[in-house]
Amino acid sequence: MSTFEEKLRRFAEVAIKVGVGLQPGQKLFVSASVEALPLTRLVVEEAYKAGSRLVVTQLYDEQLNLARYRHAPRDSFEEYAAFMVEARLKALDEGYAWLSILADDPELLQGQDPELIRQASQTAARHSKPFSQRISAFATNWCIIGAASPRWAQMVFPHLPPEQQMAHLWEAIFRVSRVDQKDPVAAWTNHIENLERRVQHLNARRYAALHFRGPGTDLRVGLADGHLWAGGAGRAQNGARCVPNLPTEEVFTTPHRERVEGWVQSSKPLSLHGNLLEGIRVRFEQGQVVEVYARKGQEILEHLLQTDEGARRLGEVALVPHSSPIAQSGLLFYETLYDENAASHIAFGASYDECLEGGHTLSQEQKQAAGANNSLIHIDWMIGSGQIEVDGITQNGQVEALMRGGEWVD
């Protein structure tokens, strides 16, 4: 039986070899929470073992952000350290690969002013957009992973004694990240191949729309003209193959910004900017949100949808089987990186260029004409479950079963 230390090292190896897809001689930038320092040390070691010439790390402590909300002047929340974005863009120009290690407190900003949260998040999104656009366009090979932290573990396992919570969260992370398997790298290779076969099938079908049905949900999502499905691994502009989100269980594409109709309700809570949103229910007309409710966090959600015109429209629709390891764990992780891979989901806000034919070369006007959406935000929220059915609507209006009981129809 593997020890915790052995599994943590295998996780670091998977992050470098599978997630980042680090190339021999390539430099690496690692952004990590201080809570993830033990994993970060192993990641750096694995990067050098894989042939990196230089690994640069940047540690952050999210409690410092909380101090801002408590004590900074209210008129200062549109301030931003733009020079940090410039440094990151320069790193991309120099060919650095990118790895982010999250270990956040899901309720960090609970009780803080929603307007300040909106201002800060919108300001950050606006200033960092040049970087986020290049990352999403695979200007380099990149990946995001998670690491257990005490406050996160307490949220996921509130009924366990405090001294057991961290161990249980780490074991859950190892399991859904396939690190508990004999050869995690081989397991990931097989999993990525399965996702790529699913992507190829969906791209061959060229559906005009998807129809979601289930408790509280009757939603038709028209797909963008020239949409492409993606999932699993991506190919960076330098030729490296990477898995941007690890773990990943989804295949996803671009909805048409004006062709979404009906009601949809969330199947899992959404952890957003340190607040928990529960019981979300939304109605769309001609692609735009016209009614919105949330049992918990409605004010936060309403502020989010006021970010810009595109915030009230969809930028992504993703399909995830209910049999995914994350769904089968029975856990709510309170972290979108994990929870979105437990259920089919949609996203308010920006589309991904990779999910549109020629998306990286089209102008903003051309992308919008095809149906893609533009926004400062991209917020995934979960709508799938074992009770959801999904149909594909062909270009001539025929209905084909895609999912029944939350599972793929093969």
Image (cartoon, rainbow, N blue to C red):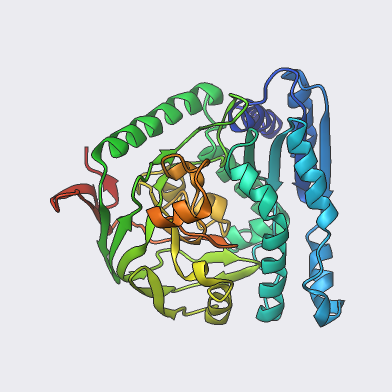
Q: Is residue 251 left or right of residue 209?
A: right
Q: Position of residue 111 (x, y in %)?
A: 68, 79
Kindly indicate the quadrant of the structure image that contains residue 28: top right
Q: Nearer the viewer, residue 221 or 170?
A: 221
Q: Position of residue 309 (x, y in %)?
A: 51, 71
Q: Is residue 197 above or below residue 57?
A: above
Q: Nearer the viewer, residue 345 or 27?
A: 27
Look at 41% across and 27% down and name the residue there: 193
Q: Position of residue 363 (x, y in %)?
A: 52, 49
Quarter of the image with the C terminus in it: top left
Q: Position of residue 384 (x, y in %)?
A: 36, 57
Look at 69% across and 29% down and name the residue there: 9
Q: Is residue 302 above or below residue 390?
A: below
Look at 67% across and 21% down and name the residue there: 23
Kindly indicate the quadrant of the structure image that contains residue 210: bottom left
Quarter of the image with the N terminus in it: top right
Count of numbered tags: 0
Kindly indicate the quadrant of the structure image that contains residue 7: top right
Residue 30 visible in image? yes
Residue 161 visible in image? no
